Image: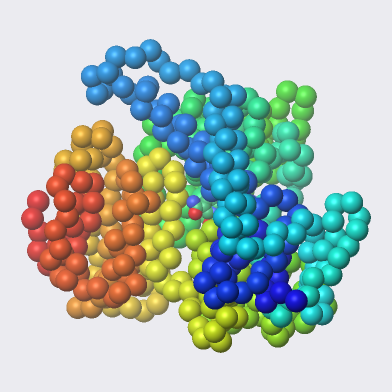
Amino acid sequence: MYDVAIIGGGPGGYAAALYAHNFGLSVALVEKDEVGGTCLLRGCIPAKTWLQTADVYSIVSRSADYGVVSSPPEMDWSAALARKQQVVSGLVKGLSGLLKARGVEIIDGYGRLIHGGVEVAAADGTTQQIEARNVIVATGSVPRSIPGYDIDGTRIVTSDHALDWPRQPRRVAIIGGGVIGCEFASLLSELGTKVHLFEALDSLLPGTEPEAVKVLTRDFKKHKVKMHTATMVGPAQIGDEGVVVPYGDDSVEVEVVLVAVGRAPVTSDIGLEEAGVTLDGGFVVVDSETMLTSAPGVYAVGDIVAGAPQLAHAGFAEGIAAITHIATGGVAPVDYRAIPLVAYTHPEIASVGLTEAAARDAGIDFEVSSHGMRGVGRAIIQGQTGGVVKIIAEKDGPIIGATVAGPGAGEMIHELMYAVAWEALPAEAAALIHAHPTVSEAIGETLLAASGKTLH
Ligand code: NAD
């Protein structure tokens, strides 16, 4: 009898498995694939590795601007693909080693919730039953598609396939201008692929501060990304040479279509309904303090959780919350207010807390402060002055949201994460001095403005 059986070895599941050692809990981790989940195998890690390749390519192509003479870069696609695979394999190996070192029993196979534990069906057709006092369901998500775009892995693909393209496509249509769509648009266009980006809503990265989206669209224009916002596509017409994507009265022909319209939770055929777990639109309803579902002893974490962001780091925090409750009966609730969100586009866009629009919708009396990167020494040195910092603070009150667009935004956002989580007043945060020269000084200037003063 294990203290905990976990179904799914992605960020939510493996974080729970790793954290359990702090309390001496015995853990079985059921996984049908390698450990690592979407993030490590088909998501964050491989995508960011490709973005790194695009970044290097881009720097080399601009090297003369920095006084470094080089030949125009050329892509060795298979070498880049091999590097991506190497990064992923190294991390998977490291994670498996760490889980074993922590005493986690990794059980290969397909897990289903049963009374008192989990039934595991192995690839060879045999099954076994694992008894556990508690079960954490962490089965993750899979890409969705839209009518007229049946995923075939060749002409109509998802990010799962795009991360393993054997060669660089010359013309791509991306359906969906959310995080995945924009990250792929950045990396492909930088590498010289012609990109058509279709988004149903009025803006790319819906829900993001418009000033930040503008920074990104400026870069997209530079890389000749054809952006079609507020545009619905008609059904794809697949031919021998490519795919025609109709929209309005027009159409575009591309080699391949990448569908990035969101991800669906994996919650069917794992015994949830039979166990009495309440679902809402396919997502699992949980108590947000403990991650407990409506079935006693059954917890859910990660991309399947109703009303929570589908982010690896949200999954980590949810895994910790579930284990804390299992081990101690106490709570360690996830502070969803202060979870940073990073689009690893070039330039990056990172945010935490409320946007201006969300603050307005919530009826909050607030003030907005912002500062551009144009005059920021380090940004000029890096040759990346397209950027902005925007901070939302309650009127005469604490910082409630922030967005950074620009080089290193994904790293810089964390100081604003503390500000939002700890409800810092702009004047308190502004009193602390940022190192010079850093891009983060743009945050210092914005904080100063938020406290009613300016320096530069
Ligand atoms: P998303 O929800 O971020 O974006 C999907 C986009 O597709 C939306 O903008 C939506 O309006 C648009 N869309 C939907 N139907 C459409 C249609 N018929 N035509 C045109 N546009 C349409 O989803 P995603 O980009 O697929 O990402 C999936 C999940 O993975 C998200 O929750 C995301 O947060 C997460 N993710 C996060 C990161 C990161 O944090 N850097 C990276 C990748 C994925």
Residue closer to the observer: 27 or 323: 27
Above or below, 377 relative to 61: below
Residue 24, image x and y in percent? 58, 74
Query: What's the coloring here?
Result: rainbow
Toward which corner of the image does residue 31 lie, by quadrant?
bottom right
Q: Nearer the viewer, residue 38 or 193?
A: 38
Residue at (17%, 71%) from the top-left corner? 428
Q: Would you identify the image quadrant in which residue 286 lies?
A: bottom right
Task: Kindly tell me whether residue 331 is visible in this rendering.
Answer: yes
Instruction: Residue at the far right: name it.
Output: 125
Q: Is residue 63 above or below residue 314?
A: above
Quarter containing the N terminus: bottom right
Please count the marks in the image: 0
Identify the residue at horizontal 52%, vertical 72% (top origin).
22
In the displayed structure, does residue 320 sit left or right of residue 38? Answer: left
Q: Is residue 53 above or below residue 317?
A: above
Q: Position of residue 197 (x, y in %)?
A: 54, 40
Residue sitting at x 79%, y 57%: 109
Left or right of 430 on screen, residue 342? right
Q: Residue sitting at 48 percent across and 78 percent down?
A: 333
Horizontal and vertical percent position of residue 173? 60, 36
| 273 left or right of 326 in image | right
Q: Residue 97, how many percent across, how many down?
A: 60, 51
Residue 264 visible? The answer is: no
